[in-house]
Amino acid sequence: MWTITPESMYRKFQFRDFSEAFAFMTRVALEAEKMNHHPRWTNVWNTVEIWLNTHDAGNLVTGKDHELAARIDNLI
């Protein structure tokens, strides 16, 4: 589940290994690029953490973030 505040949406994803985590990040990157809406994220071995907010809206959460989060959820 996403943790949502007015300034950010956050979710932590864990995978079996680095390869699965990286493959997930690749799928997310393709969706983000389609939307021209890019996450802040980290990857350490099998863990990917993602933060979403809209820079053009003063770094607040907008509909674009909710849409990208839904797309990300569909990639799992």
Image (cartoon, grey):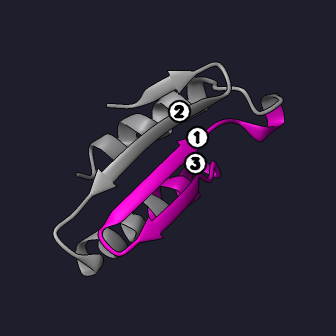
Amino acid at circle 2: Met
Secondary element under disc 3, as helix, strand or loop, is helix
The stretch in magenta equals 30-56
- Residue 75 spot, x, y in % from top left: 27, 52
Compared across the picture, whether 17 is left or right of 33 comes to left
Percent across and percent down for residue 16 are 16, 69
Q: CA distance from mark 1 to mark 3?
A: 13 Å
**Percent of width and height locating residue 64:** 59, 32
Instruction: Specify the amino acid type for callout 1.
Output: Leu
In terms of sequence position, does the residue under pointer 1 or pointer 2 come before the other?
A: 2
Mark 1 residue crowding within 10 angstroms, few (<14) / some (14–19) / many (20+): many
Of the residues shown, which amino acid type is indicated by label 3? Met
Residue, disc 3: 35
Q: Determine the CA span between mark 2 and mark 3.
A: 17 Å
- Residue at figure coordinates x 22%, y 63% from the top left: 15
Name the side, left or right, on which 69 lies relative to 9. Answer: left
Q: Residue at x 43, y 37 (%)?
A: 69
Q: Is residue 72 above or below residue 60?
A: below
Q: Verify CB contact (< 8 Å) between mark 1 and mark 2.
A: yes
35 up-or-down from 20: above or below? above
Q: At which x and y percent is residue 21? A: 31, 69
Residue tagged 1: 52
Q: Earlier in the sequence, mark 1 or mark 3?
A: 3
Residue 9 is marked as 2
- Secondary structure of residue under mark 1: strand
Q: Is residue 58 above or below residue 23?
A: above
